[in-house]
Amino acid sequence: MGGALLLIGKTNNSKRQHDGQNILMAGLAINLASFCFFFTLIIWYEVATRRIVKGLKRSYSPIIYALIFSQFFLIGRSIYRIIEFLQGYFSHIATTEFLFYIFDCMLMIFATAIYVPLFPPVFGLLGNRRLVHKVQSGDFELNSRTRMKGPASGQPSASSNESKKPETANVSHVVV
């Protein structure tokens, strides 16, 4: 932000504008590098988990593919932004509205729209609070590895506070 303010400042100080351009480009380069690093981690995770499970169904794999799809468009947008600012604030690419809509807006729409049909909670990826709420309310199914104690399973429990807690601590097998 500071780099952009220095870049378009109203003063005619070319040194400050040059410094602003450098700060802005450094920020955009760090942004692109972090997106590429995250993309690399996603790919690494996908390859590693495929090797581990070997043929077993992973309920969250559509979300991994959505992340890959989304990151691809975010990286493309970052590249566009770098090219836009490298050419200058009043360059053809920076002042053409059509290019902005295609390479900025559409890429962001694609990057986020993938999560409409692939909404993470549909695939069992709940946050900790929602999972605790579901466990406490008994509003979930358990697979054969996790059993319920108490009224939900028909077994009496020692206290009413523990009546709906799973026997095992492994809640990764909860099916919602």
Image (cartoon, helix red, strand yellow):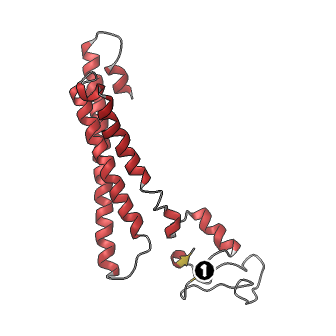
Does 42 sit above or below residue 144? Answer: above
Relative to 133, 143 lies left or right: left
- Residue 75: horizontal and vertical position, in percent? 29, 47
x and y, in percent, of residue 153 in the image: 69, 87
165 in relation to 45, above or below: below
80 vs 173, left or right, is left
Residue type pointed to by label 1: Glu
Residue 176 location, quadrant: bottom right
Of helix, strand and loop, which one carries label 1? strand
Residue furthest left in the image: 87
Residue beneath the point at 60% across and 68% down: 131
Left or right: 138 as drawn, with respect to 5? right
| Residue at which label 1 appears | 141
Question: Residue visible at 63% across and 80% down?
Answer: 166
Q: Residue at x 29, y 34 (%)?
A: 99
Residue 146 in percent (x, y) is at 57, 84
Displayed quadrant of residue 89: top left
Instruction: Examine the rendered structure and indicate whether residue 137 appears above or below residue 154.
Output: above
Q: Nearer the viewer, residue 80 or 166?
A: 80
